[in-house]
Amino acid sequence: MPVLESTDHITPRSILPHRPIIDESKKAGKKNATTSAIPPVAQRASRLKQKQSGETEPEKENDNDNKEVEEWKRDTDVDGETKRVRASSAEPSTATGPKKLPKTPLTTGSGKKAGSLRRRFALRAHPLLLLGLGMIAMLVLWTLLTLAVSWWNTTWDDIHYGRPRTFQTDMVVGHNDSPGNPSHFIALNLNGRIEVIEFPGGDASKARIYIGPQLYGNGQELIPVTLSFVDVNGNHHPDMVIHFQDTRIVYVNDTGGFRPATSSEIQTVEQYMQKHGQ
């Protein structure tokens, strides 16, 4: 009957599977002493690397061979219980480890995109494009300047002639008037219709209204109308000239009132206007 042989010596085992720590030749009653177990591939981190007796230190092939394994450190929580066992950090091997690439500064995607767009625009901008942009800018500036001038002219006419546009003057024209009591004239642009009101000798009861032309178009009701009195036919009586924009209309002084010039008088009126620059 086979008998199990007991021994008090227990061979320690590594945490790695099938990796004995000590030489099998040291065990009593085992195989030949020349036969030895395969040395472990990984060293235990809980022990320091010890030198064998009578064994000389080999030459250093690299810096990592001379380093000893550091003991593991244990972290404990407040209750004193072991939380976790972790190895202390060690520098990676410079001989066998991967090489680190030099770090390059990172830029945001928007910055790269904006820079590339600026470079492309600077490279692809054609001189004709710049010329076109300049012409557009000049056109916009000219439009703004025209609007500003138009606004200023309208405001100036509002100050001087009001709304509706009104012009008033006194003149001795020989219609029951005198230098001490001249006739009063009012020229109106009433909704585009030109009208002239005369008060002979300043008497409103004898007022006369002379209807002028009708103006058409946008803003025609804002055109100011003025009057001047000159003798255009040489009869020694001042005639009435209506001015608006670049147009002049002559009313001839005849028989105590004013009438439009006839076709035979228009040539004489034009010659007088050209001669005196009116």
Image (cartoon, rainbow, N blue to C red):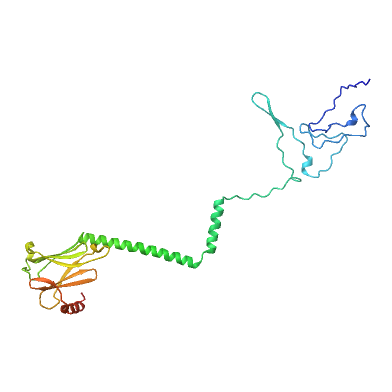
Q: Please state which of residues 195 and 65 is positioned toward the viewer in this rendering.
A: 195
Q: Give the quadrant of residue 221.
A: bottom left
* Quadrant occupied by the N terminus: top right
The residue shown at (18%, 69%) is: 242
* Percent position of residue 89, x then y: 70, 37
- Left or right: 79, with 157 as reference point: right
- Left or right: 9, with 241 as reference point: right
- Left or right: 163, with 20 as reference point: left
* Quadrant occupied by the C terminus: bottom left
Q: Is residue 52 above or below residue 258?
A: above
The residue shown at (55%, 54%) is: 113
* Percent position of residue 153, x then y: 27, 63
Q: Is residue 100 above or below residue 267?
A: above
The residue shown at (11%, 73%) is: 253
* Percent position of residue 266, x then y: 18, 77
* Tally of marks: 0
* Percent position of residue 83, x then y: 68, 28
Q: Give the quadrant of residue 12.
A: top right
Q: Please state which of residues 99 and 130 is positioned toward the viewer in this rendering.
A: 130
Q: Please state which of residues 232 and 96 is positioned toward the viewer in this rendering.
A: 232
Q: Give the quadrant of residue 214.
A: bottom left
